[in-house]
């Protein structure tokens, strides 16, 4: 069975740069679920895409404009989002912040 360590200490995990102005830390996973911390600088974006994984996201800080299946909304600290399997979505960071993403099943493409 694929799984992370039980304790993941954020200060000891290296950030992985994924786009200009966006980096991530993997905070735990097994075959069924994965949690990822994403840090965004103002103006950075994840272009419209889809994947087989269901995704829930929590806005820990910042202001973001999401497009989920053609519907655009601005979300801020404390808001949550859900993107079902194969639903197209993208995000632009309007004010620097952090998003906590959970995926099911695990995003094998995120593991090195």
Image: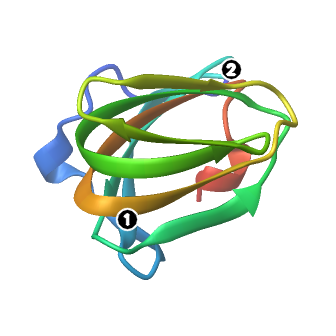
Residue labelled with disc 1: 23
Q: Position of residue 93 (x, y in %)?
A: 38, 61
Residue drawn at (36%, 41%) of the image: 99
Helix, strand or loop for disc 2: loop
Residue drawn at (77%, 24%) of the image: 84
Q: Position of residue 70 (x, y in %)?
A: 77, 45
Say which of marks 1 and 2 sits in front.
1
Disc 1 or 2, which lies upstream in sequence? 2
Residue labelled with disc 2: 1
Q: Considering only vertical position in the picture, is 109 above or below 80?
A: below
User: In this view of the protein, can residue 3 be seen by the observer?
Assistant: no
Q: Residue furthest left?
A: 11
Depth check, front residue: 78 or 25: 78
Q: Quadrant of the C terminus?
A: bottom right
User: In this view of the protein, can residue 11 be seen by the observer?
Assistant: yes
Q: Position of residue 19 (x, y in %)?
A: 49, 76
Q: Position of residue 91 (x, y in %)?
A: 54, 55
Residue drawn at (39%, 37%) of the image: 75
């Amino acid at each position: 069975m694929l799984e992370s360590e039980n304790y993941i200490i954020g200060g000891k995990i290296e950030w992985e740069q994924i786009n200009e102005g966006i980096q991530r830390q993997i905070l735990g996973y097994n075959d069924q679920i994965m949690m990822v911390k994403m840090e965004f600088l103002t103006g950075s974006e994840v272009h419209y895409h889809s994947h087989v994984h269901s995704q829930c996201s929590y806005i820990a800080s910042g202001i973001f404009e999401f497009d989920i299946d053609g519907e655009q909304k601005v979300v801020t600290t404390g808001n949550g989002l859900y993107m079902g399997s194969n639903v197209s979505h993208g995000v632009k960071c309007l004010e620097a912040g952090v998003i906590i993403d959970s995926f099911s099943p695990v995003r094998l493409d995120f593991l090195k």
